[in-house]
Image (spheres, rainbow, N blue to C red):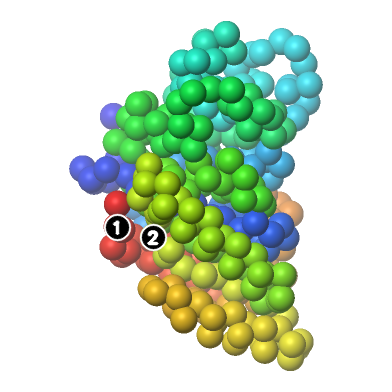
Amino acid sequence: MGIFARTSGKRGRVVAFINQKGGVGKTTMAFNTAYALKCQGAKVLVIDLDPQANLSLLFGLDLSLAAESDDLTESSLNIHHLLINSVRELKALHTGVLWSELIYQRDGVDLLPSSQELSGFELSVAGISSPRQMILKRFLERNGILDQYDYIIIDGPPTLGLLVVNILCAAHGVMIPFRPDDFSRKGLAHFYRVLEDIDDMGVSAKPTVLAHIPNLVEKRRKQEGCDLNLITEELVDRSNCSNVVDPFYNRAQLVKSQSQKRSVYDYSSIEFAQLQEKFNHLADIIQEASYEQ
């Protein structure tokens, strides 16, 4: 069955890690949750849809230098080219590459990498007549990717632009890391307005919000505790949106694993056990969820 062996006959679920605010640990959350799912026996694909490509860097890939060359080789191609290839109206920009040829596998998790070229995605598709917000969903469906994996984890950019709208139209579920501060509170409100807009468009069912993840919480700061309580109360007021998990605190072990470009599951010492348990919980939420789509 090769590298695309799966653990079940069900169609794969697309789960996105989204927040319009940067610096909330979104990429680290997506990376470690992907490995948590892998450790629980799932076949996982990670798609880096952030032009900053930090998730690709965690996998040890840096396509930025290759992207600066005018010569398009397999080593420089990335998710941007695959999305463009999936739009028939952009045939003049197509590159002769299959999505499976760009898969990078490390420690049992597959990756479709990103590069800074993805920042030009919105401009590239501005003139097409087909629904621009459905490009990612149609790419996944037309290539049968949902039949190849149990879970597709997507790391989105810190914006609410066209890339994020594509992600939300393609996703079955959403995980929302945030820092307990006033900026995050306002950002969450903006995010839910975008979800409502997608619902109003009627072109795709909006994804299920699976969890809100307080991250990088500083125990010693009383204000953060107050902000977290306020955000939690506001989320409880939203229908089916009271799922705030226990906070991830500022932990040296998470910083260490990120700096070494490893998941927390690469460490056997007792100091990583609590983090592994917390990411196992996020994986459980994803696997046990009742998705609307």
Identified at 52% across, 63% down, the residue is 192
Q: Nearer the viewer, residue 127 or 15?
A: 127
Q: Where residue 36 appears, x then y in whole percent? A: 46, 58
Q: Left of 45 or right of it: where is 158?
A: right
Q: Which residue is mark 1?
A: 292
Q: Left of 252 or right of it: where is 113?
A: left
Q: Left of 254 or right of it: where is 164?
A: left
Res 120 → quadrant: top right
Label 2, residues with CA under 10 Å away: few <14, some 14-19, many ≥20: many
2 and 1 marks in contact (CB < 8 Å): yes
Residue type indicated by callout 2: Thr
Identified at 29% across, 52% down, the residue is 293
Mark number, residue 208:
2
Res 189 → quadrant: bottom right
Which structural element holds mark 1? Answer: loop
Q: Where residue 253 appears, x then y in whole percent? A: 67, 67
> Looking at the figure, which quarter contains the N terminus?
top left
Mark number, residue 233:
none
Which structural element holds mark 2? Answer: strand
Q: Where residue 6 appears, x then y in whole percent? A: 30, 40
